[in-house]
Amino acid sequence: MSLFARLSAVSRKRKLELFHETMRPAPSMRVLDLGAEIESAGDDCCKFMDQYPWKRMITAANIDPRHVEKIARRYPEVEAVVADARSLPWPDKHFDIVYSNAVIEHVGTFEDQKRMASEVMRVGKRWFITTPNRWYPFEFHLRLPFVTWLPGDAYLRCGRIIRYNHVRKRYVTGADCSGIRLMTAGELMRCFSGGRVIKQRVTFMAETLIAVGELEAGKDSPACAEQTESQGRPASPSEPARSGPD
């Protein structure tokens, strides 16, 4: 297994552990997996659904009917639905938990991201939303170092010159990168103002930002906390060094 694959596996495992710690799921809880997919970076398993013990309580939503069809075939006990994360079809507080892994950076502009966040908080009583950290010095979609420290959307222009193709498993040129808008911790906090943001790190700096909304979240919980590689719960709210403003 490559170093990149090992780091991804550790990060994924810790996200799932943190999900169970913060969301406290139970057999009777309805869970929305927003943006669920079968494929992930060329892999054909759906990590959250494979690990979640009460699959009959999951509703999996994706804007692409092809993903929904694949989920329905692989997980017949899961309700698979075509839905746009920016305009969800369910009533207020329909789900006990809304889970979404690395989806919000793909929905469009910052206004689109705010719309998705508003819908998540509307239909869910709790939420657990992950996204890559804009200021981490390696872009995981493109697999390019330091481009995230460039101003504005210059990292996307670099990606159009060369980027990693996760299906072909090699670098390609001339790819369309318009479907990515990375977020800072400050932006994520503005989207999910009713919760907090946890910075999860496996290496020297937080690679992942996680918006967590809990029913009765502790009043003393910092709005922005960091989870280190050695800790199982949020630590200091201090910001890691970064190259640009939130």
Image (cartoon, helix red, strand yellow):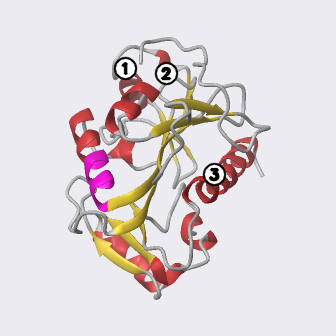
Magenta stretch: give its range. Answer: 116-123
Between 85 and 190, the one lying in front of the other is: 190
169 left or right, relative to 119: right
Q: How many marks?
A: 3
Label 3 SS: helix
Q: Determine the residue positioned at 52% across, 58% down.
A: 40
| Residue 244: x %, y % from top left | 45, 12
- Quadrant for residue 127, please give it: bottom left
| Residue that label 3 marks | 18
Label 1 SS: helix
Q: Determine the residue positioned at 26% across, 40% down.
A: 114
Q: Nearer the viewer, mark 3 or mark 1?
A: 3
| Residue 26: x %, y % from top left | 56, 73
Image height check: is 66 above or below 245? Answer: below
Q: Are marks 1 and 2 in contact (CB under 8 Å)?
A: yes
| Residue 143: x %, y % from top left | 55, 35
User: Residue 181 in magenta?
Assistant: no
Q: CA distance from mark 3 to mark 1?
A: 33 Å
Q: Nearer the viewer, mark 3 or mark 2?
A: 3
Which three-letter amino acid code belongs to the residue tagged 2? Val
| Residue that label 2 marks | 147
| Residue that label 1 marks | 154
Quick one: label 3 or label 2, which is nearer the N terminus? 3
Which three-letter amino acid code belongs to the residue tagged 3? Leu
Between 198 and 82, the one lying in front of the other is: 198
